[in-house]
Amino acid sequence: MLKIGRPNVDDAPDWYPYFFNLAPGDDLIAALQQNKQQMLDLISSIPVSKEDFRYAEDKWTVKQVFIHLADDERYYAYKAFCYSRQIDADLEVMPAGDIYPKDFHAANRTLADIRDELITIRDATISLFSSMTPAMLDFKDFPDKKIIYTARSLGWMAVGHNQHHCNFIREKYLI
């Protein structure tokens, strides 16, 4: 299997390096697997009484944070798929702020259900990146794009973004 090294910071938006720095190691597949296990360990440590906890009135619950991670990983993986196949899809920026959904329907879900969804998504992400060649990982030649991405940078972003939110859950939600 191809070792997928760290991304070039010039192949990603300015805000990505913060997340790259949260991702461990120098092999994307290993980082995705390690991050998956850390996320599952975190989920298993969360008592049922904390699943709907929010640390401030206007903040997400624990379950909503994990649903956000599922949503964003789908986005990063699909965008990486498009870049790896040289498909020019209009996915310039992930929806955020006022256009990002406020209701995740988390109240009707269990954390165990969300965990199972996250496992499925992460396994699909690992499978997707495992099939990519170096040329697929590093394609970035869409001249009309304002922001440069590569599949490689999006994969490392998936790890770092997940790690960022898992760290935040430990710091703000599980005190």
Image (cartoon, rainbow, N blue to C red):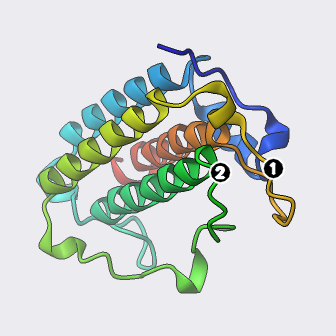
Residue situated in front as seen by the camera: 25 or 83: 83
Give the number of marks.
2
172 up-or-down from 108: above or below: above
Give the structural element (helix, strand or loop) at label 1. Answer: loop
State if disc 2 and disc 1 touch (CB < 8 Å).
Answer: yes
Label 1: how many Cα within 10 Å (few below 14, some 14–19, many 20+): few
Say which mark, if any, is on residue 86: 2
Residue 155: x and y in percent read 56, 39
Point 37% across, 53% down: residue: 173
Please state if 106 lies on the left or on the right of 67 as rendered: left
In the image, residue 35 sits, relative to residue 52, either above or below, namely: above
| CA distance for labels 1 and 2 | 8 Å
- Up/down of 9 relative to 94, above or below: above
Residue 56, placed above or below residue 169: below
Of the numbered discs 1 and 2, the one sitting upstream in the chain is 2
Amino acid type at mark 1: Asp
Residue 69, image quadrant: bottom left
Q: Residue 127 location in percent, x, y?
A: 37, 33
Residue carrying label 1: 141
Displayed quadrant of residue 92? bottom right
Residue at the location (21% across, 38% down)?
45
Residue placed furthest toward the bottom: 98
Which sits in the foreground, 91 or 12?
Answer: 91
- Residue 76: where, in percent of width, then height? 53, 52
